[in-house]
Amino acid sequence: MNDKLIAQSDLFRGISPEEAAAMLHCLQAVERRYPKGALICRQGEAVPAAGLLLSGEVHIVQDDLWGQRNIMGKILPPGTFAEPFAATPGAVLNVSVVASVPSKVMFLNIQRITTVCSETCPQHALLIRNLVSVLARKNLQLNDKITHMSKRRTREKLLSYLSSESLRQGSLEFDIPFDRQQLADYLCIERSAMSAELSRLQKDGLLATERSHFRLIAPFSPDVSGS
């Protein structure tokens, strides 16, 4: 078990590796390994615990009855997933969690965080604040995705997403966390249409791109750092 990695997660922010390790028993932590392509959590089912990714990579996806996939997000270590569903008794997932590479996950009983610990863990209050912060951040990420998808045209969706990433990373040149197919699935557009639009955007002098690396070219140079 990598205590330092666990302590680096947003859920355990401000808690020492030793304290985090001591709290895992209270949270009924269980580790599991998954091969590439494995379904970690299934859409339409309840989840008794949230996941903390220790190694690998997982995608949060929605699949419809006709096999169309919508990528909602990508999780890297030491990210977490399924927290709001695990914290709400009776809630069922509206997404699936899939291992995109071989992955190791630690499952935590989130309801043990939202109730007062019988052993009165000294860091329990901080853990609750961290959980609220994690949920708030993921709500903002979902709002960003809704903003991008609300655009009608492929070009508008791409520019909305790339502008948001530029602001988030504080630079006009950046890498995105998706390959081309994943980006198309995230924005809910056809990959061929997206590739054609990216080519047009380059010809129009609005950006330069190679694989997952982008450089935005604007008629002026805004201060993306926000200062």
Image (spheres, rainbow, N blue to C red):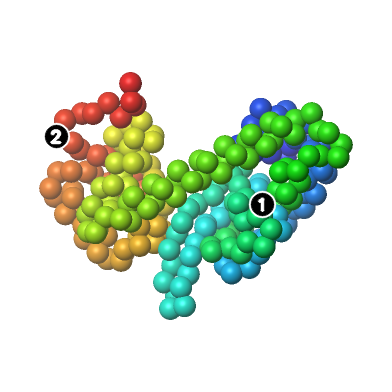
Pointer 1 or 2: first along the chain: 1
- Local secondary structure at mark 1: loop
Q: Residue at x 20, y 28 (%)?
A: 221
Q: Is residue 66 left or right of residue 81?
A: left
Q: Residue at x 57, y 41 (%)?
A: 134
Image quarter of the C terminus: top left
Residue 45, x across and y down, in percent: 63, 68
Number of marks: 2
Label 1 is placed on what type of residue? Ala
Image quarter of the N terminus: top right
Residue lying farthest to the top in this orientation: 227
48 or 188: which is nearer to us?
48
Q: Is residue 63 left or right of residue 54?
A: left
Q: Is residue 18 above or below residue 117?
A: above
User: Is there a contact, CB below 8 Å, between mark 1 and mark 2?
Assistant: no
Q: Is residue 30 left or right of residue 14?
A: right
Q: Is residue 2 above or below residue 107?
A: above
98 or 91: which is nearer to us?
91
Residue lying farthest to the right in this orientation: 119
